[in-house]
Amino acid sequence: MSVGIPISRIWPTPAAGPLDDAALTALYARADTPRLRVNFVTSADGAVSLDGYSAGLSGAPDKRVFGLLRMLCDGLLVAAGTLRHEGYRAIRLNAPRRAWRRAHGLAEYPTLAVVSGSLRLDPAQAAFADAPVRPVVLTTETAVAPPGLTDAVDLVRVGRNTVDLVAGLAALRRRGLGQLLCEGGPHLFGALTSADLVDELCLTVAPLLAGAAPGRITAGPASPPRALPLRHALAAGDGVLMLRYARDAPDPPPAGTAPTG
């Protein structure tokens, strides 16, 4: 946790003083129903990376919230291309965050869920080989697994030639992964948006201009715009903004009705 750079709430109701981890956890609390939360960092002019990597945009306040969001989720959803390009390692949480999860009836670590249409994955990559919880890979019915992959992960085949994200998320939720956190990349975010599966966007805005070359946080075919109301705005002492957008929570089911999902 980074305590050197304070984070404060500036909207809707400014909070006096910096936010501690308990206050931040409450602001990003788990939902009562299955949710897909997407987390991205961007420059002030909308770039998704610097020098090809998102880490160039991320500072201490963003990393602090990034860690809390991982603590809060059941499953961490990421595209195979992002996993390879960003060099994902095995999910790790510090002792206080593992203790928080145990106290709230959760497994010590979230489950990594990778979306891969081709199964061009290396089972020796640390994200798989060192995973504290067996990862899940959403793939197609026709993709051929490389040697050793099924020793390291569970394959969930959804869709014949392309990954059916609606069916894939439903399969993850049947495994108990109701609170999903997606970390990209842009093509996966675009596909999830197109399928109307995104419930929430947590967006960190770094106070810099990256120029015209890098792409946006979404990529792929155009899709209709969807309302996503702003829920809070936080500001860090270094000028970084952390914005949380979320669609309205669904109405609770009638008394005596079992919730679906």
Image (cartoon, helix red, strand yellow):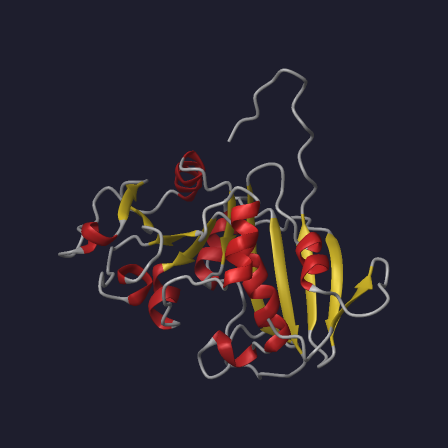
User: Relative to 185, is 143 above or below?
Assistant: above
* Residue 237 coordinates in the image, percent (x, y): 74, 79
User: Relative to 252, is 207 above or below?
Assistant: below
* Residue 160 coordinates in the image, percent (x, y): 27, 41
* Residue located at (35% from left, 56% from top): 132
* Residue 230 coordinates in the image, percent (x, y): 74, 55
Say if residue 221 shows up in the picture: no
Q: Nearer the viewer, residue 87 or 20?
A: 20
Exactly how many numbered labels are in the figure? 0
Picture quarter containing residue 57?
bottom right
Picture quarter containing residue 156?
top left
* Residue located at (63% from left, 83% from top): 209
| Residue at the extreme top | 256
* Residue 151 coordinates in the image, percent (x, y): 19, 51
229 left or right, relative to 48: right
Q: Quadrant of the N terminus?
A: bottom right
Q: Nearer the viewer, residue 243 or 135?
A: 135
* Residue located at (28% from left, 41% from top): 157
Say if residue 35 shows up in the picture: yes
Q: Nearer the viewer, residue 99 or 220?
A: 99
